Image (spheres, rainbow, N blue to C red):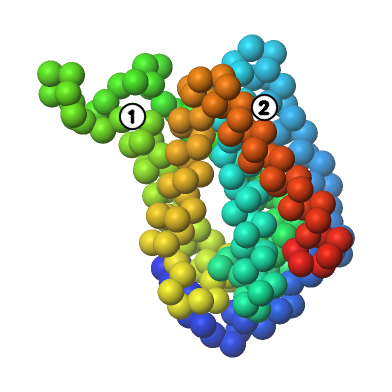
Amino acid sequence: MFVFWGDGSQEAMDLVKSIIVRSTENFNWTFIFILSVVFYVYWSEISKKNYKAVYAGLALYGVHWLYEIGNAIIAYVFGYPLWSVSNASTTFILLIGVCWELSMMFSLAGIISFKMLPEDRNMRYFAKNGKGGISCRFAGALSMALLFALFESFLAGTSNHSFIWVYKWWGVLPVFITTYIPFFLASNYVPDLEPKKRNAFLFTVWGLVALLLVVLIPLGII
């Protein structure tokens, strides 16, 4: 049911080798429906002038894309990615480690995490006399990261191999620490940065994503 580490099995390696990136063989209309939901959420926030929620969504989603590009580069260099999705589990694979449904979920994850924070985002849990304690932003990032890591362990154990971990040293713990915590730190902290710092972060991340995609896809690296 739950898989906590990659097993290095031949089956896992064969599944990864069979992945067809950006094939339309399994394409269906859920692609359009999911896209419309994402547009609705973002435009709803924009129409309410809730721009910080939009920044949160874009911050996490941009970091997500950098990770996915890095994962695809690892697959190109070493033969296998840290994580991947199977052909049978999705309608469309964008990069070897991410499908359309998963990517669209991550486009909303930052908004969800940010909106789950207390209204006073400077609140600190377990503080005494206003000192010490844990930032609600940091605590929120940890809790969301743990939830996502555990759910990924469930996906890794599904019969259609929704998630595939090949390397024996990669699993729930490293994905929790190195992947999901940075994702949710971005969504929880970036929106409240000074405008210049916030804009610099978003422009840098998304500019780098665009540059890497434009260069690496035509070269066949990702």
- Residue 216: image x %, image y %? 78, 60
- Residue 150: image x %, image y %? 43, 56
CA distance separating discs 1 and 2 = 24 Å
Q: Amino acid at mark 2?
A: Val
| Residue 161, above or below 210 | below
Q: Residues within 10 Å of mark 1 (few under 14, many from 20)?
A: some
Q: Secondary structure at mark 1?
A: helix
Residue matched to label 1: 136
- Residue 63: image x %, image y %? 59, 45
Would you say residue 91 is visible in this rendering?
no
- Identify the image quadrant of residue 129: top left
Which residue does the image show at 56% across and 30% down from the upper left?
56
Q: Residue furthest bottom?
A: 10
- Residue 194: image x %, image y %? 51, 20
* Frontmost residue, 161 versus 212: 212
Residue matched to label 2: 41
- Identify the image quadrant of residue 26: bottom right
* Frontmost residue, 193 versus 24: 193
* Frontmost residue, 131 versus 33: 131
Which residue does the image show at 67% across and 66% down from the upper left?
73
| Residue 191, above or below 73 | above
Q: Secondary structure at mark 2?
A: helix
Tag 1–tag 2 contact (CB < 8 Å): no
